[in-house]
Amino acid sequence: MTAPLPVEHGRQSPRAAAQKRPRVGVVKFASCDGCQLTLLDLEDELLAVAEKVDIVEFAEATSRRSGGPFDVLFVEGSISAPEQVDEIIKLRAVSKMLVTIGACATAGGIQAIRNWFDHEEIRHAVYADPRYVESLATSKPVADYVAVDAELRGCPISPAQLKEFLTALVTGRRPQLLDEAVCLECKRRNVVCVAVARGIPCLGPVTRTGCGAICPAYGRGCYGCFGPRESANTTSLAAWFADGRNATEVSRLFSGFTAWSEPFKKIIDANGGPPRLAAPSETPDA
Amino acid sequence: MHDLDLAAGGSGDLAIDVAMMTRVEGEGSLRLRVRNGVVEEARLEIFEAPRYFEQLVIGRTPDEVIDIVARICGICPIAYQMTAVHAFEHGLGIEVDPQVRALRRLMYCGEWIESHALHVYLLHLPDFLGYASALELAKDHRSAVEAGLALKKAGNQLVELIGGRAIHPNDGLDIAATDWLTEFQESQVSWSHALQSRDRTGRPYLLGPSSRVILAGDQLHPLAAEALAGTGLIEEIRTNPYRSILARAIELVDATAEAIEIIDAYEPPARAATPWTPGPGSAAWATEAPRGLIFHAYELDRNGLIKSARIVPPTSQNQAGIEADLASFAPQVLDLPMDQATHRIEQLVRSYDPCISCATHFLNLSVEELS
């Protein structure tokens, strides 16, 4: 649909390039724009950031456009339409570092729930005439199509992690992005465990921290926006949830914004799919 | 701009294609064709990939839906959450504490402030002062951009304080929600009636700040009403879409003044959460989002799970009106140099603050209308 922007040629010598501000791009695929908005939400730092990096492509924020090359390309959104596959491959080729931002780009997003459904059926259900609508049967993470150098997780991403990443970028060091469970954040915040104290099902033990444990702090269970932490033992947690809950209720807990991530997906599959498929008998008059 | 496919202006012919609109939320393009002074095509094309939200929520519980629909839009998630919350509360007959309602209203004010400040200062203002972005604008007018960012931050802080974070908040206090402030229900009804009456004439209608401050100006906070009168441009706001930035600024005053009053009058609610029982029924509600009226309708099955969903965002309702405006405005730019004509046309669309990620499921209707 959209012709790709031309790549800018005539680049300067490596030494001159090293002294220059990194060329940064921000692009999106299927998403809500919330993660790229997080960049504009760095109200106190935005203008300082703009002095340290050269934002050459960011259609939501500037009318100046570029098709690359990029030193760093932030990619929001999942790959869910045929032309998006071509586009991400082209963008990868002109980006030194490709960073996926948010649950859609890193895990397929909430729209990946459709991966379990009959694509033609839902296309016809939403669009009276789906001929004009191009979409793939699946919504998948960017890493399923191209190599990804770094991920910022979350739905949306955390402003603090974005700041950390940008700071590391301009100072030339490795960003500190913790891969630990939300539980540790609860302990640091003195939040009483909602699972232990109140029996509320919580994905905190298997979910990567970064949000600041917002949900438990408000008295509700974590619903996994940041996706699975490394070595997440979802099988064990699902066994805990299964005590007093049926399969649909267990599936429901994992069928959120990072449902298509492997550790969550396997629990959803083992419990009959996302709620709509797991318990069709619950909607007999549908 | 690299993606402008320029054709001749003048002589009554004009062909403008903007492959990707910039400084708008989401992915859309613009296509305008004028031959011998007659507009043949005026399209706002939305090519954002569909995400099928109305199907994703089937089989879900109302409280899951409240989290899911927030993800339709990263700029106005509260509008989606609030509309769904109110629909379910109304449908299931749930009543919450008035102080909880006030807090929700405060959070919604925060979103209006954030969204309007984003558009006024970061997306729209560069058009009027001749810059490609607010970042470039800041090089010459740093304090103006800083003031906008400070206002935007205040809005985000309200959302964060009540909802936990600025984008896709958690609604910690209002999970078990209910009704809107009585006066706000009324104001919504009167606003939507006013807009509906235009609709009954069969013409496309436009929602959002300009419509609201003109049609419901009597409901503005006194400070905002004073600001509106002070512009001396009420008639201009009514008729000239390029003046929408003023209407949005007036609503910034309105939302900020209302937020301050809510904070001053706030007392902790007797109970923050209202217990509720899932059940069957129909749930529908409309609220005023930053970009205009948003409507949700859900059918719940006998287990209280979603059987069907209909979500109507403001931009999809505005789309036909924006296209009609493009068509009526196009003859005025025929004599301009091509780059200026394109810029003016793009500016016109931007003045409606289209939120394309939200509007995506409306796509086929616009295509069919035009083909």
Image: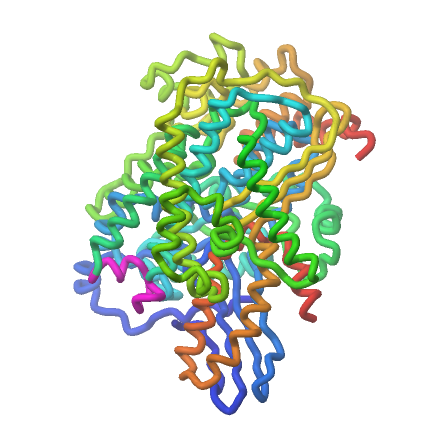
Picture mark count: 0
* Image side of residue B214 versus residue B65, left or right: left
Rendering coords of residue B168 (x, y %) = 47, 36
List the single residue furthest toward the bottom. B11
Q: In this picture, is A253 found above or below B358?
A: above
Rendering coords of residue A254 (x, y %) = 57, 27
Q: In this picture, is A223 found above or below A110?
A: above
The answer to whether residue B321 is visible is yes
What sort of colour scheme is used for the picture? rainbow
Q: Is residue B305 magenta?
A: no
- Which residue is rendered at x = 24% and y = 50% of the image? B146
Start-end of magenta stretch: B126-140
Q: In this picture, is B178 found above or below B290?
A: above
Rendering coords of residue A82 (x, y %) = 60, 58
Asked whether B66 or A57 is in front, the reply is B66
- Which residue is rendered at x = 32% and y = 72% of the image? A9
* Image side of residue A71 versus residue B365, left or right: left
- Which residue is rendered at x = 58% and y = 26% of the image? B178
- Give the position of the C terminus of chain B as an image quadrant: bottom right
Q: Is residue B138 magenta?
A: yes
